[in-house]
Structure formats: C-alpha cells, structure tokens
Amino acid sequence: MTLRNSKIILLALFMVLGHLGVAQEQLFPLGSNPLQHQNTLRSGSGTFVYTIDTLHLPFIDDFSVDRLLHPACVGAANVTSTTYYKLYVDGSPVDSVVLTRDTTFTFTYDDGSGDNDGTLYRIPHTDFTVECFDINGADPTALSSTFQGWPPYDIYDTTSGPADTTFYLFPEVIYQDSIVINTVSTNGLLWQDNHAFVNATFPIDPPTVGVATFDGLDSTGYPYNFVDEDAQGPADYLTSFPINMFEDVLNNPYSLADSLYLSFFYQPRGRGKEPEERDSLALEFWAPLDAEWNWMWSTTGKDLAAFEQVMIPIVDNKYLQNGFKFRFRNYATLSGSTDHWHIDYVRLDENRAYNDTIIDDLAFVYEVNTLLETYTAVPFRHYEANPTSFMRDTIATYQKNLSSAAKLVSNEFNVRLQDGGFNTTFVDVGNPTIQPHTSFNTEHEILAVPNTFVYDTALADTCMIFEVLFAHNTTPDENRDNDTIRFLQKFTNYYAYDDGTAELAYGIWTTGAQIAQQFNANITDTLRGVWIYFSPSIVDVSDESFLLTIWGDDNGEPGGVITQNVTFSRPTYGTALNRFIYYPLDSPVLVSGRFYVGMLQTGISPARLNIGFDRNTNNQSRIFHNATGVWTNTIFQGSLMMRPVFTYNKDYLISVEEDDLPELQVSIYPNPTQYQFNIELMERGNTMVELFDMSGKLVHSSTMNAFRSTLDVSGYNNGIYLLKLTDLESQRFATQRVVVQK
C-alpha cells in the first residue's frame, strides 16, 4: 500500500470518527527543528575559512559533545578575523590613489631678474610604489601587480611669481577594496558537515548521553522538500574529517594486518517516528585514490528496537590512504522530521576484532533538566514565596557501566549562579561498586538531610538563572566527555513543564476543539499571556485561528472560562533561539491555585494546530482536550510546550480594579438564526458592534445608540461567528458566539 493511499484511508477514518463525535487527538512529526535553526545563524560579515586538518586514529565520538562543523560566528573563541586590503602605497593601505605612471615634474624658471640668469630647472616628483593584492583569490595575500606611480600633475613656478599646477586631463584612479577573512579553527571537531542533529532527547536507552539523529530535515532544521509531502530520497549525511589511514602519527604505515575496524551503535525511531521499510540507513567509505564513495553497510526501516552495535572491518588497501573518510546517510521522507535513525559511539581504530564490542567507559545516559518537583521553570515571585514547596526531595541521574569490569564510582553535583557570585558542590559518599554491563541510577539528595538545598532567592530581585552540573568519576575510563551533564534552571516570569525540545507535534483534528494544560499558581498573581511553540509539522496551518483561553478548575479538570481573548490568534513559527511565540491576553487576569491555559480552535474546517510536544517530561494527567462537550485526558505521555506568563516584580499592577471591569450585559436572540439577530443591552450607550467569522476576519462593523438593535445576517454563509459589543466610553465589552443556519 502506498503512503498516499494510506493517508486517504486515514482521512476517511477521521471523517467517520468526526461524525461519531470522537476527537481525533494526534501526535505528528515535526515540520522543522528550531534547535537546528540557531546553528545556521552567523553574526558578522566576511568570508569564513575553515581549517580542516587530517585526523589520526583512534577516531572516537559518542556525541555527548557536539563535534559537528556548524557555521561559525564572528567573535567566537575559535574564530580569528583579519582584514585584507587590495591597495597599498609604500607599504600602507590607503583609501584610493590617483596617479600617473609617467614621471611628473616641478618646473622652476629663473626669469633673470636681479642676479638670476634665466635658467629653467626641472625637478622630478618623488615616486611611490603601488602594490595590488588579489583579495578575491584563494590567497588574499597574493601580490597581483606592483608598479611605480607619480602625482598626476606638473608644477610651474617662477622666481618672481606664484606657482601654477597643471593636472593631467585623465589621471589613473585606483580605488581601495578589502575583504574580511574569518579563519575558523576546527580543532576538536570530527565531522565536516552538520546535516544530522546531535541531541539527547530523541533516543531511548542509548549507550551514552547524546546521539546523532537522521531524519528528513536539512542542516537548517527545515524540510528538504517543502512542496511534496510524499517526496522520498537521500536526506541527512554525516561525513568524517579526512583521516590518515596510510600511516600513524609516528609515521608507521598501516596494513590490513593491523586489523582496523569501524564500529557504531544504531537505533530506529527512538522517541520520533519509525522509518518505513522503504527507508534506510547506510554507511559509505571514501577511497581517496579512486575519488569515489563505496557502500559498506545498510539497514532498512523498522519499528523501535534497542541500540545494536555494528562492526565493519577494513579489508581493502584502497582505504589505507591519507584522506580516507566515512559517512552515514539515510534515505527518508523529505518533508519533515520523520523516519528517525539514531547513531551512537562511533569508533575507528587498529588492533581490533569482530568481537571487540566492549567499551571501558562509565557514562551518563540521559540529561537532567530540573531540580524542581514538577516544573522545569517557575516564576521568580512564586518560587520566592515558598522555595521548598517546589523542590524535589531527591533527583536521580541515569548511568551505565559499559565496561566488562566492576567500577567504584564517586558522584557529585554543583550549582552556581550563571552570573557568578554563588557556587556550591555536593559530594555523595559511600557509592557502591557498579557491576559490569549494568545500568544504574544515582540518587542525589536535595531536600533530604544532610543537604536540604534550595535556590537562594536573596541572590536576585526579579529573576535567577542557575547552572546545575552533575559529574561522576571512575578509573580507568576511556571517555571523559560523557562523565558530566548540565542544565540551566530558570526563575523568570513563566511556568514550564517541558525541557525546551519538541520531539513531536500535538493537535486535535476537530472543528471547535479545545485544548488545555493544567498549572498550579502557589500565589495569587496576574497572568498576562502564554508562550506557545507551534511546529509546521509538514502542513503549514499558520492561516488557521484560535482564541487563547484560561479556565478555572473543576475537580481536577478545566471548569468555567476565566477569560477568553476576543482577538483571534494564529500559529506563528519562530526560527530563532527562543522559538516560543508570546500570545498576550486581551485583558490580564488574576489567578491562583489550579488553572488551565489553552485554546479554542475556531477554523471552519478541521485542522491540527500542532503544538510542540515534549516526550521527555510526562504531564499526561495535566493535558486535556474537549471536542464533544466533555473534557478528556490525553492518551499520550509528554508535555505540551505552552508556558503561562506572569507579571515581573517591577511590573506589577497598581490596582486590580482596572482589570475587573464588569462585562456588558447583553441578550442576543434568536440564536441560531436564518435572517437577523436581535441585540438587547441592559444599559444604553454608544456601542460598537463587530462580527467576526471563524477565521478571525471582520465581516461587519457598526454602532448602536439604543437599548435594542438588529443585525441583518441574511447575506452571510452558514457557520459560527463571534459577535463583539464594546461600550466606546467605558471600553467594557461582551462577546458571544452566534450561528447562522439556513
């Protein structure tokens, strides 16, 4: 069955479910990856030159550190910026030069007066050396030409009068030019491209923290093909730097007898989408003398499986050359973050064998993203009110002993204020011996005695950002890179459950669906808006609309509406580092205790709005949807990337009364109607009447000056509309959904 036919069947199923009143709650692949967008941002101007050195064995990368070659940034520690000029005069750069290549003179005439004898003296002007450099060539220091020049004028003088200057009619003018060369050191890097995505959130139970993920997005985080959602073909690739396989660092030549092997681990799907049978992951070798890539290994798409190690021997002398490279490639759907493969722990070295699968390494497996019990971020003012209520008693780090030997391990974690001024380290003692090939957890005490750690709110006024670092140590250990993990704990003005990275996109395929996520404010505070991360998820729905909504609590699920925007919002796709988009409330509201943030989908036809979904933090019990009149928990484990935003300390409202103006009292009937609505106000005033369709388009605007009025809708199409009435003097308003049904 083709992918297109499968989608037709699924669409038909969705239509049937819609008639049955069932919400089509879905998780879909991401259409772009904002974390890769930020890797494409480059500041400054000029040309970037990367110094790619040939590597020597051993080649080892477990992707706990990103060693891919990303676009460079002016001002970075590994970037040296130099300005090269085209034009130098007598050894110094100049703005421009006007000259003649013929000698010019000063003529002095002795007119014979007094003791003068009437002689004409001709004195040549001093010449200068002009150097022109080929700044647009491969070497901007290469000299393209050198010549002598003179000032483009002659001077005529007499002993008894002023001098005259005669300029050349067409002097030669040479203008200066320059170029900035930013030399980028690649010391410590291993890969010469960045189409794969180094991360720690997509894999499940990897050998070590961090993998390289392959999907249908390019190095910028956008799809390879925007036009055809079924397009299939070569997608990501990850290419090593050139490696000297001819001789080692001591100039000893390699031979096939040295038993060289390349090994790596791979996993399909992980927390992403499984690659289909027609998809594949492949390994290729570069033969320098033949100047061609050769297939060495591949596997076809499959569902989720544990990481598997692959051993590839070097059995051909054509690879034992200086400049050898290898690369991984995947064949996938090219329209989004689909068909995932993850690779880990790539090793190429001599004196290995087919059963050399054991790594003498003790490593972290997953990252940690918070010391808080429920959230990854909390408003500073809320945390300040009761720090211990937010903290975990203990926190676990997940580790593996990949070695065939038992390990005695010491652990610690360190917390320091990002801006300095605070630093504390906790050392865990009495660690047990970890047995070979063992996955284990280390429990770090937070509130439990003796540590009882809380973030010190006296260190800041309105926000704090701490860097938290976990580390372990054992000897021997082949790889120290995976012995440390770190994260930033933020206390600013919002709550967050998510870790900042979406693995999938969440949506409801139902017209009029509501989506809500529960939060708990431990103090009464002013809610001003919501940060939301939307993903295009292959299909761009930025023309769809929704109403930002805040609900109260009704026994653990959304209750009555506290406030709902009258203005329509639309999904906006951010591409910068902060990919969340801020959606303000029309009117800030006070909340306390449990409340719910979310939206009412207002599009005429079914559409998923595709909210970023984090699979690494599980708040399933706090996510609700309603498409049938009944609130229901999601069936998916994860967190919606929606973050309620409160007021900073310095920005608190002087009074609450301004935000608590009573709503206009209005009666609208009949509803639904075929021809007109009757509008009755409880008090007379100058009132603006506005009617919006469900796309957010204003279709009618008028004013009424009486208690009663009518609105003719006989010319409008059937559907749901939003009627907004605003008192132009007090700015009080009322909104009501109305239905035109003929």
Image (spheres, grey):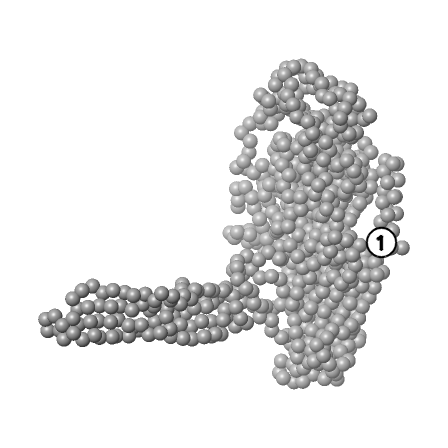
From this view, report whether residue 118 is shown above or below residue 514: below
How far from the left and from the top, in percent, is residue 162? 20, 63
Instruction: Where is residue 571? Give x, y as percent.
Output: 69, 42
Say left or right for 87 vs 486: left
Q: Residue at x 57, y 57 (%)?
A: 42
Residue 594, quarter of picture? top right
Instruction: Locate residue 395 relative to residue 119 in the image: left or right.
Output: right
13 or 105, nearer to the observer: 105
Residue 635 vs residue 242, the one in the foreground = 242
Question: Horizontal and vertical percent for residue 435?
Answer: 76, 65
**Farthest left residue?**
114
Q: In the figure, residue 217 lies in which quadrant? A: bottom right
Q: Position of residue 326 (x, y in %)?
A: 71, 72
Q: Residue at label 1?
A: 3
Kindly indicate the quadrant of the structure image that contains residue 658. Answer: top right
Q: Residue 81, relative to residue 492: is it above or below?
A: below
Whether residue 480 is visible, yes or no, is no
Give the total number of marks visible in the rendering.
1
Q: Give the quarter of the figure containing the N terminus.
A: bottom right
Residue sitting at 13 percent across and 72 percent down? Answer: 112
Does residue 569 show up? Answer: yes
Q: Residue at x 71, y 18 (%)?
A: 710
Which amino acid type is marked by label 1? Leu
| Along the viewing direction, whichever of 153 and 543 lies nearer the viewer | 153
Q: Residues within 10 Å of mark 1 (few under 14, many from 20)?
A: few
Residue placed at 72% from the left, 62% from the top? 236
Q: Quadrant of the C terminus?
A: top right
Please determine whether, in this image, residue 691 is positioned above or below residue 26: above
Near-viewer residue (97 or 493): 97
- Check disc 1 and report its element: helix, strand or loop: helix
